Image (cartoon, rainbow, N blue to C red):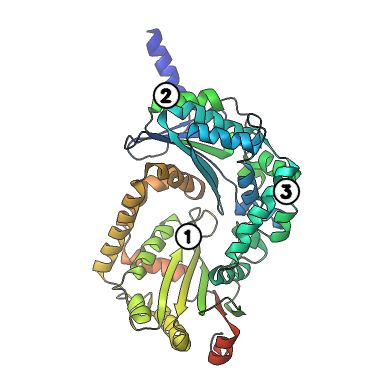
């Protein structure tokens, strides 16, 4: 009877929160401090991956903090209470045989370690010290600021990045920093330990984080370790997403064009961008956007045949990024230089027909859905990637959205895609940009036709 009472108490505690829908072999609990814990049981290889993700990133950054979520991510792998300098930190990763990294995006910062399954408890303790008890030393920051800024500088050697960066300023306006995870050179190079503490105190809280334990693990043991090690992590008395609300992005006011000259642009590139759907307000359209983008990537699509097959462009990519706060829609074209004008004219012509009832066939719709499923199957072949897939959805969609995604995708119809195109693209203001070197700009004179 005593055992039954304990089991009932445990069930009551774990079910006092709303349980999300999850795939097979995925298990969820929320600790009393608000930390969500997901265990993904996968015995393909004798390894375990632990990941902590935080709802932080570019979308939390005003101009004075632009890029500092990314710098904070780098500082995570420096000193902390248990390993007071980076040498000791790195030595411990070697002892654990760990592969480790972190990433910073628009709406999530995540950190992960992969190691032998027998090191699970040691690895969870190691992660705990880094996430809860970092030490921000000025000497460490002096070393890491140029590393982070160096990533920015390397990106600037890519003309595609320069075009995308310039586009972002126009697409997002005064809130550009909230869609620019790479940051600002001056802000990065002048960052202080005090600013790191501001980020930690605002966002690095159990009630703004998720812990994922994935791999060759036993769920009951994994949950017990999570509670033992992270259960006393003190939460805030507020929801950071409520106390520090994300301002709403203002719609693009009018269609605008720009041409950027650059000596590193060996070939011209064109980008067009719209504000697309987000998961807060129109989650159905986010799935239709994925399907339509995949349709357009098919070699059989009218889009690819009109641009690549006819020799007008070497690439003609359409993308949509699923976000909680306005997902961007974009077209990225690399025209054949001598056919720049014809290529641009055909892009505009194809856009006029995207909403046509016969723009794509039923067979192409079916093939696109099958292609998205194959991509997911390939991603799932690597167990250590499952945690990052889950935390992206936790931050930008929801765990229910992740679980239900392919069932919802199977139900996407031509009418759903036409609704998405009509609501977000056809007749809507957009920003169009081109990057080109001076010689080609003088020769092909795109300014005469690349405009409203």
**Which residue: 64% across, 54% down?**
148
In the rendered image, the residue lying farthest to the top is 1
Say which element carries label 3. Answer: helix
Q: Residues within 10 Å of mark 2 (few under 14, many from 20)?
A: few
Among the 4 quarters of the image, the one containing residue 35: top right
Mark earlier in primary sequence (3, 1): 3
Of the image marks 3 and 2, the number of the one nearer the N terminus: 3
- Rounded to the nearest angstrom, the CA distance separating label 3 from label 1 is 34 Å
Q: Is residue 84 left or right of residue 396?
A: right
Say which of marks 3 and 2 sits in front: 3
Could you classify mark 1 by the number of other residues whose Cα lies within 10 Å: few (under 14), some (14-19), or many (20 or more)?
Answer: some
Q: Nearer the viewer, mark 2 or mark 1?
A: 2
| Residue 34 in view, yes or no | no
Question: Which residue is identified by label 3?
Answer: 142
Give the percent coordinates (x, y) of residue 383. Answer: 37, 42
* Disc 3 from disc 2: Cα separation: 41 Å
């Amino acid at each position: 009877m005593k055992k039954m009472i304990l089991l009932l108490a445990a069930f009551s505690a774990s079910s006092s929160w709303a349980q999300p829908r999850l795939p097979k072999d995925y298990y969820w609990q929320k600790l009393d401090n608000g930390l969500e814990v997901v265990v993904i049981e996968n015995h393909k290889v004798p390894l375990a991956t632990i990941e902590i993700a935080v709802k932080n990133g570019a979308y939390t950054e005003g101009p004075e903090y632009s890029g500092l979520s990314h710098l904070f991510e780098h500082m995570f792998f420096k000193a902390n209470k248990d390993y007071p300098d980076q040498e000791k930190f790195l030595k411990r990763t070697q002892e654990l045989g760990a592969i480790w990294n972190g990433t910073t995006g628009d709406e999530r910062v995540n950190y992960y370690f992969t190691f032998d399954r027998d090191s699970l408890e040691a690895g969870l303790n190691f992660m705990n010290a880094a996430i809860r008890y970092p030490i921000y030393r000025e000497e460490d920051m002096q070393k890491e600021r140029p590393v982070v800024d160096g990533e920015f500088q390397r990106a600037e050697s890519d003309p595609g990045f320069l075009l995308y960066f310039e586009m972002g300023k126009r697409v997002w306006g005064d809130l550009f920093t909230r869609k620019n995870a790479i940051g600002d050179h001056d802000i990065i190079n002048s960052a202080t330990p005090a600013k790191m503490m501001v980020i930690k105190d605002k966002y690095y809280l159990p009630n703004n984080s998720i812990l994922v334990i994935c791999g060759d693990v036993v769920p009951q043991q994994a949950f017990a370790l999570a509670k033992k090690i992270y259960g006393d992590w003190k939460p805030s008395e507020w929801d950071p997403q409520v106390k520090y609300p994300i301002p709403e992005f203002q719609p693009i006011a009018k269609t605008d064009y720009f041409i950027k000259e650059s000596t590193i642009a060996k070939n011209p590139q064109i980008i067009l961008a719209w504000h697309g759907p987000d998961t807060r307000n129109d989650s159905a359209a986010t799935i239709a956007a994925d399907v339509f983008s995949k349709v357009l990537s098919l070699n059989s699509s009218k889009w690819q045949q009109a641009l690549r097959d006819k020799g007008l462009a070497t690439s003609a990519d359409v993308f949509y990024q699923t976000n909680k706060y306005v997902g961007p829609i974009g077209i990225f074209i690399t025209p054949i230089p001598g056919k720049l004008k014809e290529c641009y004219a055909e892009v505009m012509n194809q856009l006029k027909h995207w909403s046509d009832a016969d723009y794509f066939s039923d067979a192409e719709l079916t093939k696109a859905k099958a292609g998205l499923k194959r991509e997911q199957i390939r991603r799932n072949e690597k167990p250590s990637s499952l945690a990052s897939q889950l935390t992206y959805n936790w931050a930008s969609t929801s765990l229910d959205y992740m679980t239900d995604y392919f069932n919802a995708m199977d139900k996407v119809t031509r009418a759903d895609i036409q609704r998405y195109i009509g609501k977000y693209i056809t007749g809507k203001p957009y920003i169009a940009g081109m990057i080109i070197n001076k010689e080609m700009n003088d020769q092909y004179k795109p300014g005469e036709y690349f405009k409203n």
